[in-house]
Image (cartoon, rainbow, N blue to C red):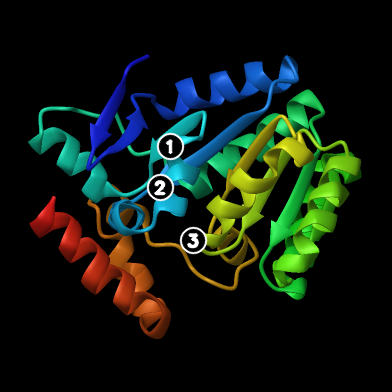
Amino acid sequence: MSRVVICNIPIDNYTMQETLERIDQAILGKRVIHHVVVNAAKIVNAQKDPELRNSIINCDIINPDGQAVIWASQILNRRLPERVAGIDLMSALVELSSERNYRIFFLGAKEEIVKKIVELYKHKYGENIIAGYRNGYFNPDEEPAIARQIADSNADILFVAISSPRKEIFLNKYKEIIKTPFIMGVGGSFDVVAGYVKRAPLWMQRSGLEWFYRLMQEPRRMWRRYLFGNSKFIFDY
């Protein structure tokens, strides 16, 4: 399917279901698929960060996670079918893994959070779904060993809950070592699933106000991203 280009960033014209089907086919065929989601802030940052931009455009699937991106595609007459939120895709893939006997490696967040994620999924889906886990606090010189740890786990799926642009750059740099069939950055999704951060009500998600809900919950961490990133996306691009 054709890609839509917004601010020099190509975005796949896939629905959630089409994305899931392509991922499932790749895992079954043991083909490595690198996935990324983009929102307004990430697109803006990619304009001034060549390493981040290369990490995005080198991905096999690029989904729009951010209502501003969907609105921009409509205004520019390059309509994308729907928002494919990273946390929703992650949840769907965990369910798919329980059906297909896929194994998942969880990388990122604080130790207590990633452990809680693992325990939650073990309780719901059984131990076989877990290939391994590690928290997201490590130095650059530890990265090669972590990449090999993931490779040795023989996982089918890797979720990386580290902030941007670090997760995009890490995956782009080490995916040839990791060789996990499906790799994906999931941002703060572990915090939400583990219950440390609440997700916006469904009506706010559908109306494009999820960013505002997150800002109210974590103003110190999020204000700069939404004030400068989203504003620049709207007015400059």
Q: Is residue 184 above or below residue 113?
A: above
Q: Is residue 197 above or below residue 134?
A: below
Residue 57 numbered tag = 1
Residue 2 placement: quadrant: top left
Residue 23 image position (x, y, % from top left): 60, 25
Residue 46 image position (x, y, % from top left): 35, 53
Rounded to the nearest whole Å, what is the CA distance between mark 2 and mark 3? 12 Å
Frontmost residue, 116 versus 53: 53
Q: Is residue 27 left or right of residue 79?
A: right
Q: Which amino acid type is shown beneath numbered disc 2? A: Arg
Residue 12 image position (x, y, % from top left): 37, 27
Residue 164 numbered tag = 3
Q: Which amino acid type is shown beneath numbered disc 1? A: Ile
Q: Earlier in the sequence, mark 1 or mark 3?
A: 1
Rounded to the nearest whole Å, what is the CA distance between mark 1 and mark 3? 15 Å
Mark 2 surroundings: few (<14), some (14-19) or many (≥20) residues within 10 A: many
Q: Is residue 128 above or below residue 194?
A: above
Instruction: Give me the residue at 78% from left, 40% from top.
Output: 177
